[in-house]
Image (spheres, rainbow, N blue to C red):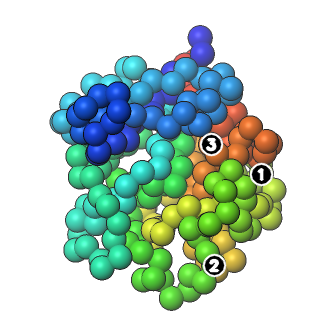
Amino acid sequence: MKPRIALPADTFTEATNIINERNAAFAPDPAIQAVTKSGGIPVILPSIKAADASAYLDLFDGLLLLGGFDVDPTFYNEEPHYDLGTTFRKRDLFEITLIKAAVEAGKPVFGICRGLQVLNVALGGTLYQDLSENPQAKLKHSQLAPGNLPSHHINVKNDTLLHSLIQERSYVNSRHHQAIHHLAPGLHVVAQADDGVIEAVESKDSNQILGVQWHPENMFKHNEESQALFADFIERSIAVQK
């Protein structure tokens, strides 16, 4: 059976031309295509009451956390920074609860951009609300180049899951203004940009969790390394079915 991959939905806060209502749930098509090309079945999960999030667990084999709004900093005990972007607390509450339940249940997790960030927060870490808070951040992490093209390099550590999938010096796209500050217990850093910004993390004692700061779903059609990340995630999700 093909593994079922949960995609927690983003929220379109403005009214659409199709439904004249606000707060429509949606999942980005590139992520859906990346999952299906790699052999998975996408299952889109609208944000519901956080208390009910664990009811979704039986519906999926792997959890894919995608991009979107900034994470509300009150989840890591900080007040909003001047350059904090738009937040959506309902999604944060839902995803943080779902992440904790999925990790506890042994489900494979793959986080992308915001997905990496909310994963770190859910497991006890903190974020730079804006990279202006990090005096070491010197590179352009929010590229003006088309999103399906790479813009800066990352350095991948040896003897990691990520190193088995992509090159030690990899060229990635970049579309973020927040980043990991204090790393959550249970995670370790496996890639950084030349300015030290954390670009990828994994779980310390297993291959359950991989999170990346870039957007492989925008590059998988023409970039073998991006496709390898999704293929690996599907393989990890198949393994939990056995």
Marks 1 and 2, the one that precedes in the sequence = 2
Question: Is 195 situated above or below 110?
Answer: below
Tell me the element at label 1.
Answer: loop
Reading the image, the residue beneath label 2 is: 139
Instruction: From the viewer's perspective, tell me whether residue 40 is left or right of residue 80.
Output: right
Where residue 119 appears, as percent x and y from the top left, is: 42, 52
Where residue 132 appears, as percent x and y from the top left, is: 45, 82
Q: CA distance from mark 1 to mark 2?
A: 21 Å
Q: Nearer the viewer, residue 199 or 238?
A: 199
Amino acid type at image mark 2:
Leu
Amino acid type at image mark 3:
Glu
Where residue 46 appears, as percent x and y from the top left, is: 32, 31
Q: Residue placed at 72% from the left, 55% from the top?
A: 149
Which mark, by number, is residue 132?
none
Where residue 21 appears, as percent x and y from the top left, is: 23, 34
Any part of residue 169 in sight:
yes
Q: CA distance from mark 3 to mark 2?
A: 22 Å
Tell me the element at label 3.
Answer: helix
Amino acid type at image mark 1:
Ile
Any part of residue 54 in sight:
no
Reading the image, the residue beneath label 1 is: 166
Q: In which image quadrant can residue 158 be found?
A: bottom right
Q: Nearer the viewer, residue 82 or 170?
A: 82
Name the mark nearer the viewer: 1 or 2: 2
How busy is the neighbourhood of tag 2: few (under 14 within 10 Å), some, or many (20 plus)?
Answer: some
Q: Residue placed at 53% from the left, 49% from the top?
A: 112
Q: Residue placed at 71% from the left, 41% from the top?
A: 220
Reading the image, the residue beneath label 3 is: 217
Instruction: From the viewer's perspective, tell me whether residue 155 is left or right of residue 48.
Output: right
Q: In which image quadrant can residue 52 be found?
A: top left
Name the mark nearer the viewer: 3 or 1: 3
